[in-house]
Amino acid sequence: MKKDHSGFFEKVYEVCRQIPEGRVTSYGAIARYLGAARSARMVGWAMNGSKNLEDVPAHRVVNRNGMLTGKSHFGGSDAMAQMLEAEGVPVNDLQIVNFQQYFWDPMKELS
DNA sequence: CCTCTGACCGACA
DNA sequence: ATGTCGGCCAGAG
């Protein structure tokens, strides 16, 4: 099952999988944790393939503003916000309420 | 094989 | 404070 553990994407998938329920993180946080803060864009892009994986909750990953920028990729509906709210994360207008409160930093938690 | 773009972030003018 | 640009990896045309 481990295919490209040396790849950038695989690392992103692993971190996303470690995100606890009812918690959220940002692309930049993951990228930074991987040592590629400037590759935040690719983290989101990596999710494009991860969304096919059920083991990777891409809906728990938002931008650094706590905005559900990737919501458009979740079927075009508010499915992303619905899933977050279902986990206990309040979302208002594509923006997570008290984002800082639900923010899960891989560098802090996984450090 | 070469080029471009992609769910971002941070720096600079 | 607002707008623009660069940057990193990998896949599609």
Image (cartoon, coloured by chain):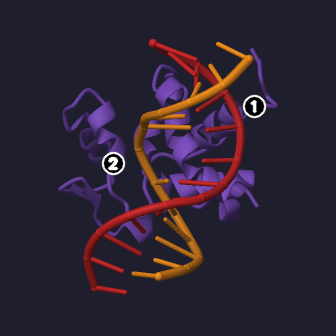
Chain colours: A purple, B orange, C red
Q: Position of residue A61 (x, y in %)?
A: 46, 47
Compared to residue A23, the image places residue C4 above or below, namely below
**CA distance separating discs 2 and 1:** 24 Å
Q: Amino acid at mark 2?
A: Thr
Q: Chain of mark 1?
A: A
State the image quarter where residue A46 is shown: top right
Rendering coords of residue B4 (x, y %): 48, 33
Name the quadrant containing residue A74: top left
Question: Residue A2 location in percent, x, y?
Answer: 77, 19
Secondary structure of residue under mark 1: loop
Q: Give the chain letter at badge 2.
A: A
Q: Which residue is mark 2?
A: A69
Q: Which mark is on residue A7?
A: 1
Image quadrant containing the N terminus of chain A: top right
Residue A87 visible to an observer of this rendering: no
Vertical side of C6 occupied by A74: above or below: above
Examine the image and state in which quarter residue A55 appears.
Answer: top right
The residue at the point 75 percent across, 31 percent down is A7
Q: Residue at x 64, y 43 (%)?
A: A15
Q: Residue A26: image x %, image y %?
A: 50, 55
> Residue at left 74%, top 55%?
A35
Quadrant housing the C terminus of chain A: bottom right
For mark 1, does the 10 Å Cα neighbourhood hold few (<14), some (14 to 19), or many (20 or more) residues?
Answer: few
Q: Residues within 10 Å of mark 2 (few under 14, many from 20)?
A: some
Q: Secondary structure at mark 2?
A: helix
Residue A6 versus residue A101 in the image, above or below: above
Q: Which disc is residue A81 wearing? A: none
Kindly identify the amino acid type of the residue bearing the numbered disc 1: Gly
